[in-house]
Image: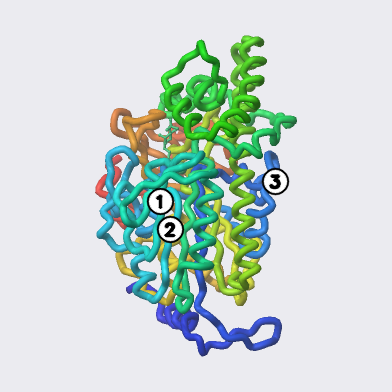
Amino acid sequence: MKQIPQLKTMALMALSSATLLQVNGQSKEKKPLNIVYIMTDDHTAQMMSCYDKRYMHTPNLDRIAEHGVRFTSSYVANSLSGPSRACMITGKHSHANGFTDNTTCVFDASQPTFPKMLQRAGYQTAVFGKWHLESLPTGFDKWEIVPGQGDYYNPRFIEMNGDTINQKGYLTDLITDKSIDWIENQRDKGKPFCILIHHKAIHRNWLSKIEDLHLYEDRTFPVPRNFYDDYEGRPAAAAQEMSIDKDMDLIYDLKMDRDDLNSSLKPTYLNMIKRMNPQERKAWHEFYDSIACDFYSRDLKGRELAEWKFQRYVRDYMKVVKSLDDNVGRVLDYLEKSGLIENTLVVYTSDQGFYIGEHGWFDKRFMYEESFHTPLIMRLPEGFDRRGDISEMVQNIDYAPTFLEIAGAPIPDDMQGMSLMPLLRGDKNVKWRDALYYHFYEYPAEHSVKRHYGVSNGRYKLIHFYNDIDHWEFYDLLNDPYEMHNIYNVPAVKPLVEKMRQRLVELQKQYKDPIISKN
Ligand code: SGN
Ligand code: CA
């Protein structure tokens, strides 16, 4: 076990009901900490006002950060849903947990995961919502998941007995209802608990709640400064198929449907609309059909069309965030009202970041900042005084060891993440990592993002695209935060590149990634 004995003792103390905690000068009985882990899908930090004020206000997410911490250098290990979820529950990189991509993998559910270890440490565990690991959840006292990507409207849920049931309502609301109901009525209240609330929101194709359809329609946003990227010196970026201009489907993504028009994704879109009840469908058509009528009458071309698509995309995305933020508010209100908030850690994150027009894109996958980064904010319980920003580089493999330390459970030696507890406690002289490793595998596949691995130390980033390409990129994030200039071949930076290449190989060896870079 790699846990420092002193930390382990402190974590065990958290479980002892006899422990006294000093709060506002008064001694209080210290109860074991509960964990409420809320993870959304494709929610990027640009769309959270606690990170970025350009787009929208997210008052409830901001509540989490205000009463706790905001991680400013939070990253994923492999920017895709299933892989991120596998990294998160195992505390291991993709090659080590076996779930490298969404298209070919089935998660080996017999392997050790933090929910199983929390159960052994005396916790009640539950997960509701998107699971996306192909095998069924293990290590949970209660689970109810959506099949695959899930449906926004009147969705299907898979229950623990294997039955698939249809439910009425909007998915973000339903996942929240089920989660609150489990905490309030179903769990064993004699035990601490850990609940994973896994939303489908804000995943493509951004179907908002009917009540929120009208929102943000009076707002227009400047396109990001690198919206018109020419991908010079970056052949993998040039080869992608996730461009708002070229690949975003007018019908499926932007809801500009008309009876006489077709697209490859139109049948999928129509199936989604079919899930709505007649009133919902009517309101939907009333809203989008007039926009479509106006759009087709204008026959936009070139940059005008690209920028029009960007505005529609941003507005629809924000509408889905709005109901997510409302539902996060419902969870926080419930925890406050029930008094549970005092000894509950609330974590909010996403399975990865997302492009909001940067490089002209939607989607994720690349090790470039917008999709390598993922939001991470935590509302801290009583006794944790740390507030504000934590700038150390953290990764989604760190969540599992963090939760184990909170529960006073041993952290297995082969877990590759680091517990965030020293950062949350504000320990002085914390010895933290100086670089992060990343590896993306899903290619050939949708959006055509080539396989790559890389290392980032926050200032410099080295990426190797491989498989049907052999191409290196090197970025100076301080001078080129938008990653527009690949300076890999600039002679003056050669020593820096070599240093980062060494670090990359060290990390590949440390994490035992069989791909170890040869160059
Ligand atoms: C779906 C989406 C993709 C998306 C993947 C992975 N296409 O296949 O745009 O990249 O999911 O997303 S769609 O036509 O079905 O909307 S992930 O977050 O689940 O990894
Ligand atoms: Ca995702």
| Image coords of residue 21 (percent x, y) | 59, 84
Q: State the CA–CA distance, disc 2 to disc 3.
A: 28 Å
| Image coords of residue 500 (percent x, y) | 42, 47
Q: Amino acid at mark 1?
A: Ile
Q: Quadrant of residue 293?
A: top right
Q: Which residue shows up at 43% across the image and 44% down it?
A: 166
Q: Amino acid at mark 3?
A: His
Disc 3 designates what residue? Answer: 57
Looking at marks 2 and 3 on the same chain, the residue that comes earlier in the sequence is marked by 3
Q: Which residue shows up at 66% across the image and 51% down it?
A: 50
Q: Are marks 2 and 3 in contact (CB under 8 Å)?
A: no
Q: Is residue 386 above or below residue 102?
A: below
Quadrant holding the N terminus: bottom left
Q: Is residue 20 left or right of residue 502?
A: right
In the image as oriented, which residue stretches furthest toward the front? Answer: 278
Q: State the CA–CA distance, disc 1 to disc 2.
A: 7 Å
Disc 2 designates what residue? Answer: 127
Q: Quadrant of residue 218?
A: top right
Q: Is mark 3 within 8 Å of ligand 2?
A: no
Q: Are marks 1 and 2 in contact (CB under 8 Å)?
A: yes
Q: Is residue 213 left or right of residue 264?
A: right
| Image coords of residue 484 (percent x, y) | 54, 31
Looking at marks 3 and 1 on the same chain, the residue that comes earlier in the sequence is marked by 3
Q: State the CA–CA distance, disc 3 to disc 1.
A: 29 Å
Callout 2: few (<14), some (14-19), or many (20+) C-alpha neighbours within 10 Å? many
Q: Is residue 39 above or below residue 298?
A: below
Disc 1 designates what residue? Answer: 145
Q: Amino acid at mark 2?
A: Val
Which numbered disc, 3 or 1, marks the residue closer to the eye? 1
Secondary structure at numbered mark 1: strand
Secondary structure at numbered mark 2: strand
Secondary structure at numbered mark 3: loop
